[in-house]
Image (tube, grey):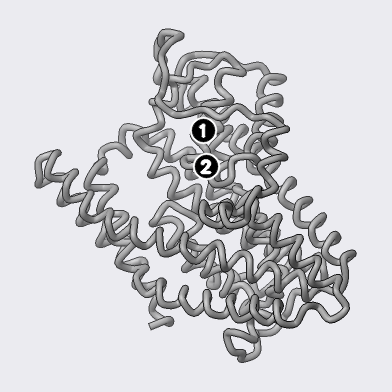
Amino acid sequence: MKRYFPALIAAAMILGVLTGFLINSDLPPDQAKAAAGGLSIITDLFLRLIKMIIAPLVFSTLVVGIAHMEDSAAIGRVGVKTLGWFMFASLISLTLGLILVQLLQPGASLALALPPASAEAGVATTSFSLKEFITHLVPASIVDAMAHNEILQIVVFSVFVGSAVAALDGKAPMILTACEQLAAVMLKITSYVMVLAPLVVFAALASTVATSGLGIVLVYAKFVGGFYLSLLLLCAILIGFAWIAVGSRIGDLLRTIREPWLLAFSTATSEAAYPSLLAGLPKFGVPRRIVSFVLPLGYSFNLDGSMVYCTFASLFIAQAYGIHLTFAQQVTMLALLMITSKGIAGVPRASLVVIAATLPVFHLPEAGLLLILGVDHLLDMGRSATNVVGNSVAAVIVSKWEKQLRIGPAPAETAEAAVTA
């Protein structure tokens, strides 16, 4: 079945769109909404299963990965290189969104009147505070952090545990063995959960199309098309960097991330792809200790697709209301989004929250978010899939930078052995 899994995912996507279209066109709106609600049960169940796995999987693999590094200097070196690449990729993503929205001008034709100053979009804003961001990094309780899937807090705790284990002379063999076995068990559970993926893809797309219909794409064709063009260009740039790192094996890398990419796209969440990436990238040749270090950080600091959206959507709103932002204001917006986008890991509809918090700074109407709420789910599909590409490339780049990228195919190994590779 593994061999045909990507084909099953693709078929499920097509059937999901067709089914959703039939429901939307043949049933009254209230019945179509009820049918979509029934289908969403499958998607919600799958995402809960994924969330159930992620916290123990991140903790166990990150502890094992750090504990198997040579020394504290290696941990610091990999960490600096990882964050350095994240900042570079973030700058590319934000700048690309800024340039493309200026070239395409998707909002210029709307020419909307400014809404009342009191008008709101209904999206809760989160003001950025350096103090709150830094204090939020450290969990008051690791149990609470795991209960709420606070990935960044789990990463911080895991780094401390892994570093402490690595610093001990005997490397705490019982704790290390327990973490290795926990990771192996979580990966096995992941293989069970992923059997549901084609059904989930079908249900997710059918539910979305049944509720919104395909007509909404035509209404926002220029905005949606321009944004997806930005994502395609960003993916091409990122894959170009990966090609420099892996050369002729770029096809193998694309095949490795194809299934997680499709899963993230269809479910509109990059979390769904995390376990598949964690299992697939080591088979490609990225050391598991680097994968288990880079991916959790990437899910907090390297949301490339979301960052393209922040600049693209913010300037789209400005164009729709005929508000001109100077070059200096646009650069300031880019710098502000570079910082604030790092503090919203785990926030529902995080990109909208960041945009809602950014608009008032540049005197843009918050009600402008209503212009994009209708197609946000469609755009979130592209953002999530691009985040998967960005984090996969990050793991490859860092392992190449560390001169630990394996050139040949992975040797045969058991699940438990793979965790310690």
- Please state, as top left, top right, bottom left or bottom right, where the N terminus lies in the image: bottom left
Q: How far apart are marks 2 and 1 (CA)?
A: 8 Å
Task: Determine the image quadrant of residue 274.
Answer: bottom right
From the viewer's perspective, is 379 left or right of 182?
A: left
- Please state, as top left, top right, bottom left or bottom right, where the C terminus lies in the image: bottom right
Q: What residue is pinned by disc 2?
A: 347
Say above or below: 321 vs 205: above
Q: Please tell me which of labels 2 and 1 falls first in the chain.
A: 2
| Residue at the bottom extreme, as displayed | 412
Image location (x, y in percent) of residue 14: 29, 61
Circle 2: element type: loop
> Crowdedness of circle 1 by 10 Å Cα count: few (<14), some, many (20+)?
many
> Crowdedness of circle 2 by 10 Å Cα count: few (<14), some, many (20+)?
few
Which of pointers 2 and 1 indicates the residue nearer the eye?
2
Depth order, front residue of 1/39: 39
For residue 195, say whether it is visible. yes
Depth order, front residue of 116/242: 116
Q: Callout 1, which amino acid? A: Val
Depth order, front residue of 177/143: 143
At 78% from the left edge and 76% from the top edge, which residue is drawn?
68
At 61% from the left edge and 64% from the top edge, which residue is drawn?
58
Q: Callout 2, which amino acid? A: Val
Say above or below: 160 vs 268: below
Asked whether the residues under the numbered discs 2 and 1 touch, taking CB atoms below 8 Å apart as contact, a structural biologist would say yes
Circle 1: element type: helix
Image location (x, y in percent) of residue 13: 32, 61
Say above or below: 416 vs 329: below
Q: What residue is pinned by disc 1?
A: 353
At 72% from the left edge and 68% from the top edge, which residue is drawn?
290
At 26% from the left edge and 58% from the top edge, which residue is drawn?
16
Image location (x, y in percent) of residue 87: 74, 46
Say above or below: 279 vs 125: below
